[in-house]
Amino acid sequence: MLSKKIETALNGQIETEAMSSQFYLAMASWAETEGLNGTASFLYRHSDEERMHMLKLIKFVNERGGKALVPALKQPPRTFKDINDIFAHLFKHETQVTAEINRVVDACLKEKDYTTHNFMQWYVSEQIEEETLARTLLDKLALIGNDKGGLYLFDRDLEGLTASERPR
Ligand code: OFO
């Protein structure tokens, strides 16, 4: 059975995952209208993954005797400056999500809720993958600079990549 504190913390995390999904959906849609089709595919998939992270939490809360809350969501940004801006936002957002996950994990330890602590470890590892990927993509973009051919290849390489994979 979940304590009230942990139920609230997990509901907060449900909102965070839902917001991530919306945020990446907005980025995907923007990228698609800019002709960045590989980037758009990657971000649409990333948005779906975040929704899956949210669903996993909803099911866990309900199975453990709590009540999952489906949150209202804020309007995400409509436009972005360029592809660098997209991945800078994505990296920053993921580091904030990691900090929130760490807070949930910390609350589990304080409440001695080892079951939820164990469940949250999946999110801890997922964040390592996602942060590493976002950092690697930002580094690649920094190397490419304004080289149009490089940007074309970067976008094409993103076509088949998923958020928890490492790029070559
Ligand atoms: Fe849910 O992993 Fe990103 O935010």
Image (cartoon, rainbow, N blue to C red):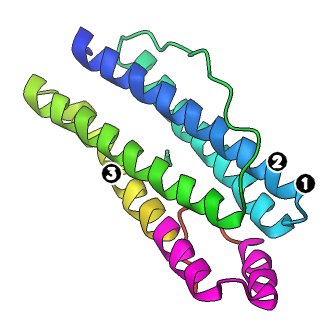
Residue, x 56% and y 81% (percent of image)?
Answer: 142
Does residue 3 appear in the picture of this structure? no
Q: Quadrant of residue 86?
A: bottom right
Query: Amino acid type of disc 2?
Result: Ser
Chief secondary structure of the magenta portion: helix
Can you give x and y, in whole percent of width and height, for residue 22 in the image? Answer: 66, 36
Q: What is the span of residues highlighted in magenta in the rendered image?
A: 134-160
Are the residues tagged 1 and 2 within 8 Å (C-beta)? yes
**Residue 93 belongs to the span the image colors magenta:** no
Which residue was labeled with disc 2? 29
Query: Amino acid type of disc 1?
Result: Thr
Residue, x 62% and y 21% (percent of image)?
Answer: 73
Which residue was labeled with disc 1? 33
Name which of mark 2 and mark 3 comes first in the sequence: 2
Label 2 vs label 3: CA separation? 28 Å
Name which of mark 1 and mark 3 comes first in the sequence: 1
In the image: residue 42, left or right of residue 63? right
Label 1 vs label 2: CA separation? 6 Å
State how many labels appear: 3
Residue, x 67% and y 70% (percent of image)?
Answer: 161
Residue, x 73% and y 43% (percent of image)?
Answer: 25
Q: Quadrant of the C terminus?
A: bottom right
